[in-house]
Image: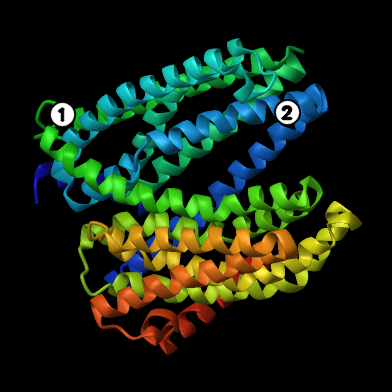
Amino acid sequence: MSRLEQQADKTATVESEPHQRPASTPVQRSAGRFSTHVAWTFATRVVMIASSVGASIIVARWLGAEGLGALAVLNVTVAVALQIGSAGLPSANTYFIARDKSRLSSVCANALIFALLAGGALACGVIVLAKLRPSVFGNIPVELITIAAISIPFQLILLLGLNVFLGLNLIVRFNTLDVAAQTLTLVNAVIALLILGAGLRMLVALNVAASVLMGLLIIWLIGRMLREMSGVQPIRPDAALFKRMAHYGIKFHIAVVAAMLIFRADLLIVNHFRGATEAGVYAVATQVAMMLMLLPGVVGTLLLPRIASEQDARGQMTMRVTRHTAFVMFLICLAAAPASFALPLVYGAAFADASWQLLILLPGIYLVGIESVLVQHFSSLGLPRAIPLFWLVTLLLNVALNLAFVPMFGARAAAAASSICYALIFVLVAGYFRAQTGNHFSTMLLLRGDELRELFALARTRGRFASR
């Protein structure tokens, strides 16, 4: 192991293992650390959601629906630019660093150059589009769009940098920076609107300033980390490595974009054929569905660097985590079924059908949640072309089903189409996993007796601790 790898492992250990338990086995310690990382990352995501909701409430109260809508358009514009322009490189950062930490300096150099060039090009593209086709952005002034676009390179630096820390298994740092960036949006709303009494322009400017600050902080933190790691060569880009990163990233990107379209395009189809009212009801059901998939998303995010570093061709670690995820997701979906009937109480009687739409979505949510963890095995092995191909096939089926049945049957048909397609991608990935590893479906999905006993023992321990 190189000195760079030793230093990175030492740093990760300091962050993730403040208290050792000598009596536990290495497998138990590893599983314990992973579950702790999942719990903290999930909690971080909840805080980020709360910050986002809090900021939107403040904006809605002080700037009204028009101001909130304008801010949402600006945020979506930047988010779409980042989603399209990142080209899967954030995940490539995680994968290549986890596989070989000696590449760290070259990966970081490649990522920084890419962020500045691609981010700058994306920002210029958004500004030019706003000036040439202002109707695309509605009535939002070009000046506001220009200000918001300035943040794109720095947000791309933040995104790429976070995945560097993820690849090094520095989960505390990863979560701290992630939640800090999101919390600043709430702080900015308080400062701009409540304290200064300013308007949307000031809020957007503060958000951009926060993005610049976070981007520069990421550069400083990574630069300091590289300087502290003895034996690190001068930071230089590596064109050959970047070509490999881009190849991996594009395959990953195809799957991500296809998944995003499957999760979102049906709402647009419902709106087109059935109107805004039915689309609004379906939006509530899909929003709850996305929240239910938050946990497996977190698990998958943290699992990739772990198994990429271990290079486990048989997928033993992946199956262990998948079994636990399947069990927990079953409990979550089981609880969500009766809870779905509370949606009309929260949103109003007009949203009564959201309960039935969510019930239709639940089987698919359960299966795609499992798939999002299981597929990390292939992500850790370089992502075979079959995986993005599976997503493209599923996307085509999803669009076809929605176009065929939504005009006549409405949002319930969209929910059914989504559930069917979620099940399809699960079957394709699980079947491919079985074919490649030789493991049975029961080994992938069903908890073993000792694992169940460990879960029950953990639950009893937590219960006794909570009662004190």
Looking at the image, can residue 15 be seen?
Answer: no
In the shown orientation, is residue 113 left or right of residue 465? left
Residue furthest to the right: 349
Residue 157 locus on image (x, y percent): 37, 29
Nearer-the-camera pick, 266 or 42: 266
Report the quarter where the C terminus lies.
bottom right
In the shown orientation, is residue 131 left or right of residue 98? right
In the structure shown, which secondary structural element does the residue marked by tag 1 occupy? loop
Q: Earlier in the sequence, mark 1 or mark 2?
A: 2
In the shown orientation, is residue 22 left or right of residue 8? right
Picture residue at 25% right of the left edge, 83% below the top: 438
Identify whether 420 is placed above or below 11.
below
Q: Which residue is mark 1?
A: 237
Quarter of the image where one finds residue 392:
bottom left
Check disc 1 and give the amino acid type. Answer: Pro
Identify whether 103 is placed above or below 327.
above
Q: Which residue is mark 2?
A: 68
